[in-house]
Image: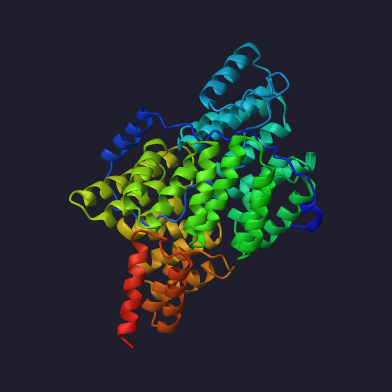
Amino acid sequence: MSSRTNDKKATAHVANRPDTEPVPDERVAAVRRVSAARRPWRVAGCALLLAVAMTGGAIALGAVRDGGSGSVATASSAVPPGLLGGGDLDTSIAAVQAHLRTQPKDFGGWATLGLAYVEQARTKGDPSRYPQADKALGRSLELAPHNEQALSGRAALAAARHDFKDALTYADEVLQQNPYSERALSSRIDALVELGRYAEASKAADIADERRPGVPVFTRYAYVRELRGDVTTAQRVLKQALSTATSPGDVAYVAAQLGQLAWNQGDYKTALTYYSRALGADEDYLPALEGRARAQAATGDRADAIKGMELVVSRYPLPGPLVELGELYEARGAEGDRAKASDQYALVDAWTALARANGVNADLDTALAAADHGDKASALRAARAEWARRHTVHTADALAWALHVNGHDQEALPYARRATATGYRNASFLYHSGMVELATGHRQDARARLTAALKLNPGFSPLGASKARTALKNLEAAK
């Protein structure tokens, strides 16, 4: 980040992120019913939250970094500006719906409703909201073609469904109208990151930093730097973002990002400190609850880790937390734990079915989740399909691992190496790469990568870390 930007007194522009909204019991029950009706998978090792994610990710997303803008749209002039800023998103949506019943031609109200549905789907892990978002945003564009708010909503919806090419197209259309749109600038960075166009993402982050410095841009700027191995800059920028955060939602969001960054580097004490700060701002903030459970597991506090992750999946039944909880059960090894783990893995299958039924591309989640404990052939098909769409470090890692578990190690090798080529410091990637190097006879490279994985983050996975140590012991014994 430029020194000029460092001197700016940036302020947070995002609305409160209602990530604390719990998944209703009936929602979890519905997922379980779908799971019971389908053949259960044995799935584990999911390294990436659906970022509507997750993206951004950025996958970004949460653990992956949220792929969306992470905020609710500014309400139209006819809708009270603070309507969607509160913590109860369901109540806010009901209020917008009531408003639209009396003012059905308010295109801004329809855009607000569409964006709120996207946010609701993201925060609740409920992909059934995406078709509703699509209809609301479409109505807004019927009433006012090319209006900025609805196009921004289209970008957010496309990203949520992992259609990052369309997300980029919509973001660019908004920026043609308003080059200073914070939402569009953020969505453009997210889309470029999730398409694997990292050099362009870096330039987009620089432009966004110049035009609209603040929490949304700072967090994305940091993630782009982290993906390229510049952890120092990523940490500095996130700390700056935290210093400018004013709302509890922004404090929780940025502090959790700092916790995730520390956890990735194996600094569990610092990670727990930041997660504590996030939960101090919002005691129900799910990404912080999940991150805290991961850090507790890494420090050997398995009982609290399981308790915490059980809470997370009861509210937010997405692939990442489900697989993590399953692995924690397996690692504990008590009577009945394997059955409990299988139940969690089966829920990933159910969630994937629901996501696909509502227009979400879930191939990356399928590949990651099924490769270790599920249908290996399905994992490979999904990984190949995702690689055909986008070339990111995450898709390279997923394809390499799916190839490996299917016995195609020579084909896996270039993908495994590509996953770590940007300098991104990810212990799971190093572990996967090390195992592929070992399988292809590159023993020295395998030793180096497995050692690096455990040095970077010795508790990166309840099961993977143990397997990495075993592989290293076998390598040493074979000297």
Residue at 54% x, 19% y is: 94
- Residues 312 and 343: in front is 312
Query: Given the current orientation, which residue lies at the most extreme bottom position?
Result: 479
Q: How many marks?
A: 0
Left/right placement of residue 166 relative to residue 299 reads right
Query: Given the current orientation, which residue lies at the most extreme right position?
Result: 4
Q: In which quarter of the image is the N terminus?
A: bottom right
> Is residue 374 shown above or below 279?
below
> Is residue 367 shown above or below 22?
below
> Can residue 463 be seen here?
yes
Left/right placement of residue 180 relative to residue 331 reads right
Residue at 49% x, 34% y is: 20
Query: Given the current orientation, which residue lies at the most extreme left position?
Result: 335
Name the spot of residue 422 as percent of width and height, x first. Answer: 59, 68
- Residues 263 and 159: in front is 263
> Is residue 77 shown above or below 454?
above
Q: In which quarter of the image is the C terminus?
A: bottom left
Name the spot of residue 17 as percent of width and height, x first. Answer: 58, 35
Left/right placement of residue 285 relative to residue 210 reads left
Name the spot of residue 34 as percent of width and height, x first. Answer: 31, 37
> Is residue 56 shown above or below 262?
above
Left/right placement of residue 36 relative to residue 321 reads left
Name the spot of residue 141 as percent of width and height, x first. Answer: 68, 29
Displayed quadrant of residue 114: top right
